[in-house]
Image (tube, rainbow, N blue to C red):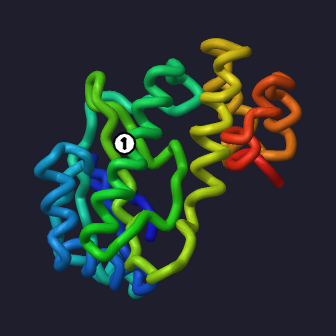
Amino acid sequence: GYLLWRDDSLLRCVTQAGAEDVETLYASGLYAELTRLGLLVPHEELAPSPDIGTDVRRVLKPQLLPFISYPYEWSTAQLRDAALLTLRILEISLRYGMMLKDASAFNVAFNGCSPVFIDILSFTRRIENAAWPGYRQFCEHFLLPLLLSRDLGEAAPGLLLTWMHGIPLHIGKRMLSWQDRLRPSVAMHISY
């Protein structure tokens, strides 16, 4: 899918590739649960128009937030809150037979002081006995910057400006203090 601005409205166009996952998200009740809890931005469904694209199966109009900030602008506390939101959504999704296919910090925005998930196309059906496909990205976007914040302080989230796809684990591991590198709980997650 992709985003499109039209007539002062932001539209999320869902192509054939994402249509089944979005249908499952709605049919499973997960969308209703996450929006009820205020964890996912609500979306209004619009009728697709032929001028948008022939491959578009659904057109969703997300509720706009008054202000958008980016992970590299956040404080360490905001990055932590966004990480916890991502894990909470993953946990709830599993109960509905779904999961997050990715874990980008850019899938989260803040509505006031509260983090909210904004990427409706990040949901997919759960694959039984499969590892979480977003795990490495979670470590690169959240866990590693949070670990680095112990030494770098509030500058750590700013590293996501340099590495917008996440801090590569082999680079971030060298940036950790030697004490952190020796901790089994760190080595288990930050390895390459």
Q: Residue at x 33, y 53 (%)?
A: 89
**Residue 157, quarter of the rendered image:** top right
Q: Nearer the viewer, residue 7 or 28?
A: 28
Is residue 165 visible in the rendered structure shown here?
yes
Q: Residue at x 24, y 77 (%)?
A: 48
- Where is 149 relative to 162, above or below? above
Q: Residue at x 38, y 79 (%)?
A: 125
Per the image, label 1 sits on a secondary structure element best described as: helix
- Where is 126 relative to 169, above or below? below
Q: Residue at x 25, y 42 (%)?
A: 64
Where residue 158 sits in the image (x, y, percent)?
Answer: 65, 24
- Where is 128 relative to 157, above or below? below
Q: Is residue 127 left or right of residue 134?
A: left
Q: Nearer the viewer, residue 88 or 40?
A: 88
Is residue 49 visible in the rendered structure shown here?
no
Where residue 107 sits in the image (x, y, percent)?
Answer: 45, 48
Q: Is residue 57 left or right of residue 141?
A: left
Q: Residues within 10 Å of mark 1 (few under 14, many from 20)?
A: some
Where residue 169 sits in the image (x, y, percent)?
Answer: 78, 46
Task: Name the residue beneath numbered marker 1.
Answer: 85
- Where is 27 relative to 108, above or below? below
Q: Nearer the viewer, residue 166 or 178?
A: 178
Q: Nearer the viewer, residue 149 or 73?
A: 149
Q: Amino acid at mark 1?
A: Leu
Where residue 162 sits in the image (x, y, percent)?
Answer: 75, 34
Q: Quadrant of the C terminus?
A: bottom right
User: How many numbered marks, from 0 up?
Assistant: 1
Q: Quadrant of the N terminus?
A: bottom left
Q: Is residue 141 left or right of residue 54?
A: right
